[in-house]
Image (cartoon, rainbow, N blue to C red):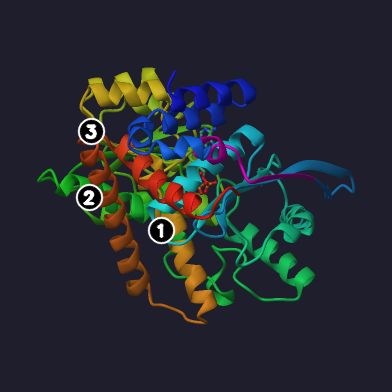
Amino acid sequence: MDYVSSVLNELKKKNANEPEFVQAATEILSCLEPVFERHPEYERAGLLERFVEPERVVMFRVPWVDDAGMVRVDRGYRVQFNSAIGPYKGGLRFHPSVDLSIIKFLGIEQVLKNSLTGLPIGGGKGGSDFDPKGKSEGEIMRFCQSFMTELYRHLGQDADVPAGDIGVGSREIGYLFGQYKRIRGEHVGVLTGRGLSYGGSLVRKEATGYGLVYMVEEALGHRGDSLKGKRVIVSGSGNVAIYACEKALSLGAKVVAMYDSDGYIADMGGIDLAVIKQIKEVERGRIREYAERVKGASYHEGCRGIWNIPCDIALPCATQNEIDLHSAKALIKNGVKLIGEGANMPTTLEAIEAFRKAGVVFLPAKAANAGGVATSALEMAQSSGRMFWTFEEVDAKLRSIMSGIYRSMDEAAREYSLDGDYVAGANIAGFCKVADAMMAQGVV
Ligand code: NDP
């Protein structure tokens, strides 16, 4: 058996109770065999065994008091996956589904994503199984303070710099930052996604969604096409989805459907984003209210049906494994041309294979949604330099970073005679830089 397969088999055995981590690692490792053929020295250095094992996993208790005076306990995580090319960087997710498998899959993806940005950031991820839904402001604040009271000792602006993810937006980052500052007595860039009044960067809020659409536009441009007039499905209605929708609309596309975890709305005339923003960002309400406010729109319970709506482009922007083989077949049957992954691992391995066979352009998450972390790194640069760049400056840098990522994965795919296979291209390009740095730093 070759080296890569034997490491993957061992990983599957060791982590049999971590299905999402195994899924992400399988996708990555199945692309790396040609790299190891060219670099036999990596095997002797145990490079792959080290790459798939996080440098450190921290798990902790998060006790907090609810509004009724009851003590609640959730579980906190920080996986510091790989620091070969820079300090650990990656978001915090608050969602009841969070467990070690989810955080490790997000962590290993983050290592390669951060490498692809070309910026000096390593990979990490964290979060909690705390469910923010239905909690009061006071409960959210007390939870965040308790979470940071343990986490702070593992962080540092040059050591580990978290950001947001599902369930962690600007409000939560504010509370987490406030507690860090209070404990450490220092106002430093230890979290990104901060508010503009206390060290945040312009464009950070928009960055993941905008970056995704910049890459879609780039991929279409290379095929003599553009977003103009395209019917787009954007799943989710959180941070990534809203700003993907905003940029797609500004480039002339028509977004025909979105969802939250209860169900989806369809609006074939084109979604009115102002209404979505009012419901989701201002009122923190449910997406079903859109159909009550906008004539011609419909609401459907459950999420899966969204992929039966005919579209040219699908941008899954909610969560992992949103598109399974069944959904992929429906999309292909309806003539989808391009999938751009805004969420992390939103497409199952079988669905990716179906898109590949059908010749659908597939932009994988670690490349397509890297705009968020890239702009976080720009926030870190502004913090350290005590600078504040304009919206136009940050947006131009984001655009150029997305274009650079597209080029790297395209070139890596070509170099290995896998033209147009961006899953392979992104994994290879991301991995090679990390591998170089790990080899240079000895057995650590
Ligand atoms: P948000 O919490 O802002 O939004 C998440 C959205 O997805 C909500 O509409 C939520 O619905 C929906 N959702 C969550 N879980 C499910 C589920 N199981 N089924 C159906 N819908 C679901 O998160 P973000 O927009 O920040 O993150 C979305 C994705 O993008 C995640 O995969 C994240 O890892 C990834 N990502 C985010 C980045 C960022 O900068 N924020 C950067 C790179 C990747 P509801 O409100 O009903 O729960």
Q: Which residue is mark 3?
A: 418
> Sequence order check: which comes first, mark 1 or mark 3?
1
Cα–Cα gap, marks 2 and 3: 22 Å
Q: Amino acid at mark 3?
A: Leu
Identify residue type, mark 1.
Ala
Rendering quarter of residue 363: top left
Residue that badge 1 annotates: 207
Q: Residue, x 69% and y 62% (percent of image)?
A: 175
The stretch of residues the image draws in magenta is 47-60
Q: Secondary structure at mark 1?
A: helix
**For the residue with label 1, is its CB less than 8 Å from the closest atom of ligand 1?**
yes
In the picture, measured across the screen, residue 113 lies left or right of residue 251, that is right
Q: Is the CB atom of the residue marked by disc 3 within 8 angstroms of ligand 1's nearest atom?
A: no
- Name which residue lies at 64% across and 37% down: 98
Q: Nearer the viewer, residue 369 or 175?
A: 369
- Using the image as rendered, state which of residue 89 and residue 268 is in the foreground: 89
In the image, which is nearer the foreground, mark 1 or mark 3?
3
Please report the residue visible at 28 percent of the width from the left and 62 percent of the height from the top.
Answer: 400
Q: Earlier in the sequence, mark 1 or mark 2?
A: 1
- Please name the residue that numbered disc 2 is placed on: 217
User: Would residue 59 be seen by someone viewing this image from the given angle?
Assistant: yes
- Of 145 and 42, nearer the camera is 42
- Please determine whether, in this image, residue 234 is positioned above or below residue 349: below
Q: Is residue 72 left or right of residue 124?
A: right
Secondary structure of the residue carrying tag 2 is helix
Looking at the rendered image, the quarter that the N terminus falls into is top left
